[in-house]
Image: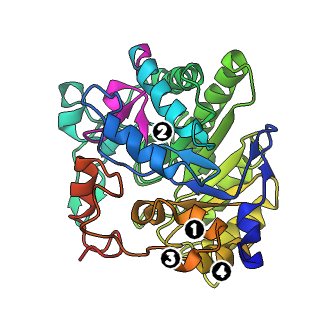
Amino acid sequence: MKPKYATLFEAYTLPNGMEMKNRMIMAPMTNYSSNQDGSVTEDEINYYTRRSKGVGAVITAVANITPGGKGFPGQIGCDRDELIPSLSKLAKSIKGQGAKAILQIFHAGRMSLPDEVPNRDVTAPSNIPAEREGTLGEVPRELTVEEIEGIIDAFGQATRRAIEAGFDGVEIHGANGYLIQQFFSPHANRREDQYGGNLEKRMTFPLAVIDKVQHTVKEYAKAPFIVGYRFSPEEPETPGITMGDTLHLVDVLADKGLDYLHVSLLDFWSKARREADTSKTRVELLLETINKRIPLVGVGSLYKADDAAEAKKTGIEFLGLGRELLIDPEWVQKIAKGNEAEINTTLDLNGKEKLDFPDSFWKVITSIPGWVPGVK
């Protein structure tokens, strides 16, 4: 390993005392590969096992906490105790390779596909449809206060299942337009009760979910257990979440006793668009606001070893590797062995079997031009 990459391999102790062996994390990516009942498949296990060998931690594809929170076909489930053995198998496969296993948990809200939820009952903070590539999604039904409280409790139950299944932690998915982000968003949330209104009131639901998850960890975990939170920094809609809104949220989250924050970005070096210094990258603004109170995970098109080394110079604690590990499962090991020049940066379209891809996931990624380099 060359000295300029040494910072990628430094150990780090999280706020809860758990040590991460290096600064690279497999980022969560939807893989459409679980069984219809939410249990994991053997192909999915092989896919994760292969990619767990070099990173310090693996954050799984998102798992739904209620039947009504399912977002898409082939999704991992953590909405009932019957799935604990399946979740345990997944956790064991990741941990067996020396990586921490973190289960990402969520409710899709208005982003759910009607065919994937009971009675086609798509729900959200308000009955405002999502804007999807110039068209509107399903008009959701507005959640009642009682239903909201039930969903908060369901996040706690999902955390209990993750603990019982042997995971090292959970990541609360407050990004990518799903339910937690919807409550924070002035576009999705038009409520006038305790869960909506001004910026502080729109934080009520995300903070309540964090409190429930942390309470569950205290009640059930017998060893340190990671609780992370993922967020998207801005929304394109008007009204929508601005960078200013997110900096306010992050300032609050940094003092919530979490173990890390995780910003969802397609480009690590992207700059703020609204209500912040647009000459600075989002990562720079976040690091300034956090001011070392909590570690931050950054992600976004860091395909080469030099890309990662340059990103690490910002002072960010962890780097998430998503598409990088899809293309080259041995990305981390090649750097460790001094073979960084051998890293593949474009997908081998004839490499499905040798890359241990589940069939359904392969069909998805090879059908989206440009999402993975090499797919035209």
Whether the residues at callouts 2 and 1 have beta carbons within 8 Å, the answer is: no
Answer with mark 3 or mark 4, whichever residue precedes in sequence.
4
* Nearer mark to the viewer, of 2 and 4: 4
Which numbered dot is residue 132?
none
Residue 173 seen from this side: yes
Which secondary structure, mark 3?
Answer: helix
Give me the residue at 67% from left, 79% from top.
310
The image quarter containing residue 288 is bottom right
Answer with mark 3 or mark 1, whichever residue precedes in sequence.
1
Residue toward you, 186 or 55: 55
- For mark 3, what is the residue? 342
Which numbered dot is residue 334?
1
Task: Tell me the CA gap for discs 2 and 1.
Answer: 53 Å
- For mark 2, what is the residue? 192
* Residue 76 is inside the magenta segment: yes
**Image check: 99 left or right of 7?**
left
Task: Tell me the CA gap for discs 2 and 3.
Answer: 56 Å
- For mark 4, what is the residue? 280
Q: How many labels does the image show?
A: 4
x and y, in percent, of residue 49 in the image: 47, 44
Q: Specify the quadrant that holds the C terminus.
A: bottom left
Give me the residue at 58% from left, 75% from top.
340
- The amino acid pointed to by label 2 is Glu
Answer with mark 2 or mark 3, whichever residue precedes in sequence.
2
x and y, in percent, of residue 291 in the image: 81, 62
Answer with mark 4 or mark 1, whichever residue precedes in sequence.
4
- The amino acid pointed to by label 1 is Lys
- Crowding near the residue tagged with mark 3, few <14, some 14–19, many ≥20 C-alpha atoms within 10 Å: few
